[in-house]
Image (tube, grey):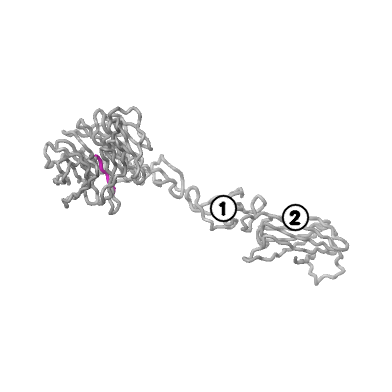
Amino acid sequence: MRLFLLVLLIVTMAGCKGEERQAGAVRVDLSYATFRPGCLTLTVSDKADPSRVTAQELKTAETPGSRPPRSRELTVAVFRQEGWSRDLIVTLDAFERDCTVDDRKRVASQVQEVQVPEEGILVVRLDLRATDLDDDGFVRTDEGGTDCDDANAAVKPGASNLACTTAQGCGGTFSCTAEGVSTACVSPQPFTPWYKDVDGDGDGDASALIRGACSAPEPGAVTTSGDCDDSSPFVFSNNPEVCDRLDNDCDGQTDENMCGPETWNEIASSGTAGTTWNAVAPHAEGQAWAVANDSKLVHVKGTLATEYTCAGNWISAWARSSDGRVFLGSERGVFASRTVENPDCGGNDSGHEARLNGLVGFENGPETTLFAVSSNGRIYRWNYPAAPVEVEDATPLNLRAIHGTKVSNLLAVGVDGSNAPVILRANADGSQWTPETLPAGLPSNTALRTVHVVHDGLAFAAGDNGVVLMREKGSWTELPRLSSDIKGLVAYGRTAVYAATADKIVKRFDGTSWSDVHSPSWVPTAIHGMGPQEFWVVGFGNGIVRREP
């Protein structure tokens, strides 16, 4: 141990005369442990006259890294100065910060009264303890220190580089709470209001505030809130107005100052009165394919219909937007594809002579992925130009249609072995399909023949006996039932649902009730479109009609 001499009133040894001191002395054995004091002081005062006081900083040897050791023992000799009484008060104090810091925090202290003997040495001991578990130089707050998180050395007074993210997604740093007993992630960033955007059009519903945050609190959240119909991706603030019976720009008006009477144009094709167009596949404004039995295809561009051929009886079709290539499904389980320019249809056999009742596809850069359903309950994935692959065998279901805006929201509809309606939902990659729960009370012998997904939060399905179902927030409900079988359906929001019925009527549901919008002279078989301003209806009697903007 080191011997340290403390002279009262800080009189140096060299300047003192021996007779000025009494012979007796006090030896103070000092120690501390479990923390690293930034400042250690010993104070001695005269009990008889507290104005007589002196204090001195006790230097401790530094460890590697220029830090005080976590434990230390020292010995100090205290001599009585002339004029002082023999009764002294000895105080040992430890502080978190250096002795030069004015507002340093005292974290440990011990006081002892002693009487200096006339002769000899009185030995006393002062021992300090404080808790600094994370060894960051600061003592925990419940012991008088300033460390509100003694389990994390990075959290301490003055620390500014411990990055964190608040519950609101804001970047910040960990700081002590006002109570000083715990830490919180504190950020200077202001909150931004975030809103739900169910239809995915980039504009949220003002009545659907999620919360204020610095980043999206949930997938799909947006910071704008001008959407007046969050069920339709064709309606949002500042969207250009088109002629589609919707308030596209959310200004409170519909089709204002630009739209005349609704136009339904019959397309003259080279088919005969006996031609039945089984499916229609639009791929650009004013352009679509229609497919039929007896190898017949027709491509319509504006009012011009051009006939093409692919060997087979075609009952389903989908066309991609990038180049207008049409993909086909036949009544004998064969897949094919062609363009306007190239007559090569190729051909891939599904392995089953079952009707390929529905096709839908997705473009992702150079890749095209399609899904198809068949009358024997099979679901196929077609990564064109590779051959289709069966991904689901849902025998004995008879699947009639499939649709989605992306693979993860695909729905397939049809009828089960007891002639009850059925809907299957795909998982994220389309490899697994799960039956959906349908409303009770649907009529028996009801096959669902058509399905249309608007977005993740909204879809519609329809079929026999005038049944129309709506899927919203993950649950199916029935809309007002129609009086005739439904052959096809398209939807562009909760208030823009169009159904083609077996009694030669195209009907529109406005969110409350159905109304007639067109009556062709033939029975429709399918309806499809790329948006509410333009869609196509095809059917018996060589019927092709286009609803134009």
Rendered location of residue 409, percent (x, y)? 34, 43
Mark 2 crowd level (few <14, some 14–19, many ≥20, 10 Å Cα): some
**Residue 470 seen in the current view:** yes
Above or below 223: residue 450: above
Q: Can you tell which mark lies on residue 466?
A: none
In which quadrant is the C terminus drawn?
top left
Above or below 46: residue 354: above
Q: Between disc 1 and disc 2, whose residue precedes?
A: 2
| Residue under the point 80% across and 70% down | 13
Rendered location of residue 47, percent (x, y)? 82, 56
**Residue 256 seen in the current view:** no
Kindly identify which residue carries mark 1: 175
Q: How many marks?
A: 2
**Residue furthest out toward the front:** 351
Mark 1 crowd level (few <14, some 14–19, many ≥20, 10 Å Cα): many
Rendered location of residue 118, percent (x, y)? 88, 62
Judge by depth and name the residue closer to the eye, 451 or 149: 451
Q: What is the three-letter code of the residue carrying label 1?
A: Ser
Residues tagged 1 and 2 counted as in contact (Cβ below 8 A): no
Place residue 245 in its image quadrant: top left
| Residue under the point 61% across and 49% down | 181
Q: What is the three-letter code of the residue carrying label 2?
A: Gln
Residues at marks 1 and 2, CA–CA distance in whole angstroms = 31 Å
Q: Can you tell which mark lies on residue 110?
A: 2
Place residue 263 in its image quadrant: top left
Q: Nearer the viewer, mark 1 or mark 2?
A: 2
Q: Is residue 518 left or right of residue 36?
A: left
**Judging from the image, what secondary structure is the residue with disc 2 in?**
strand
Rendered location of residue 152, percent (x, y)? 58, 54
Q: Is residue 167 left or right of residue 41?
A: left
| Residue under the point 78% across and 58% down | 125
Give the residues in magenta: 357-362
